[in-house]
Amino acid sequence: MILIQESEDLELFSFIFGAVIGSFLNVLISRLPQGLSIVTPRSFCPSCKKTIPWYYNIPLISYIFLKAKCGFCKEKIPASYFIVELLSACLTLVFFIKFQLSYEFFISITLFYVLLTLCFIDFKHKAVPDYLLLIALVLSFFVTTQPLVEAFKSAFIFSGAFVLLNFVLTFYVQNIKSKLTKNENLRTQEALGEGDIPILALIAVVLGVKAAIIAVFLASIFAIIPSIYSSFVKKDVQTPFIPYLVLGFYVEYFFVLEDFLKVSI
């Protein structure tokens, strides 16, 4: 009974710890693209510039208590802040249940924190820092259960295939679709962004090529509706794909659809 209670306490602590980390990830998401220090100054409201006191900065709780508004100027706080903290908390809890306090827990959750940060930066800026992509790619080699040589082979095969696909699709978009739609913006658009390739490589490193194909297929499905919305409603020809790649990766990583398909077949 005591052991069960201790386990539940640790799980609760892991959730709280993850929410706190999520608050820090929000700082990274906000400041890294702007080249600002992540240490100083303390957290402040982007609207009124006032420093946020600790009691207005409690992960998850403050957002709900303040009704998604700044405690000073009452400017609306973006929902993404709450979503990042909640996702970070849930991911930490899931990995703690899976690995407990182990090397696998710390290295795996660090990779997923970096990917979460990349997702929300890409959503906001449609560009991500190269060093975060490199960190995520390096971490993937520590997370994978594949032998190192096989992991490298998977990365090269999978990302290389998409480099070729990107060449073909980009040629179509720039030279054929742009003429058919008479959209000059398409003449400089690439089918895949440069940041997508390292994400594709790390997916293959962690999951293997077969499961990575499933993850990318899922990512494509997830991206269809937002892409149509961006193209026709927002008139935006660029849709950030990293968030959907990561979502597809998360789904395949946690639910292992590859095994389910094997059984079905």
Image (cartoon, rainbow, N blue to C red):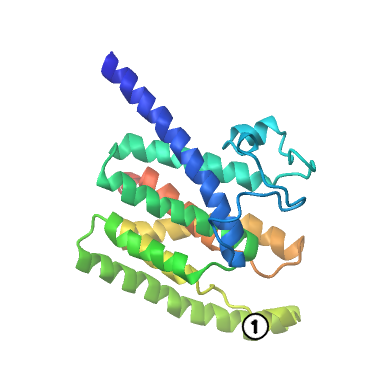
The percent coordinates of residue 213 (x first, y second) are 39, 61
**Residue drawn at (38%, 48%) of the image:** 109
The percent coordinates of residue 165 (x first, y second) are 47, 76
Q: Which residue is mark 1?
A: 188
Q: Number of marks in the image?
A: 1
**Residue type beneath disc 1:** Thr
Q: Quadrant of residue 37?
A: bottom right
**Residue drawn at (43%, 50%) of the image:** 250
> Can residue 120 be seen in the rendering of this structure?
no
In this view of the protein, which residue sits in the foreground, 82 or 73? 73
Quadrant containing the N terminus is top left
> Can residue 159 be seen in the rendering of this structure?
yes
**Residue drawn at (44%, 80%) of the image:** 164
Q: Is residue 131 above or below residue 163?
A: above
The percent coordinates of residue 226 (x first, y second) are 65, 56
Q: Residues within 10 Å of mark 1 (few under 14, many from 20)?
A: few
Side of 118 where 5 appears, left or right: left
The percent coordinates of residue 255 (x first, y second) are 38, 43
In this view of the protein, which residue sits in the foreground, 114 or 28? 28
Q: Residue furthest bottom?
A: 175
Q: Quadrant of residue 139?
A: bottom left
Side of 145 where 119 appears, left or right: right
Q: Quadrant of residue 11?
A: top left
Disc 1 element: helix
**Residue drawn at (71%, 38%) of the image:** 68
Q: Is residue 128 above or below residue 251?
A: below
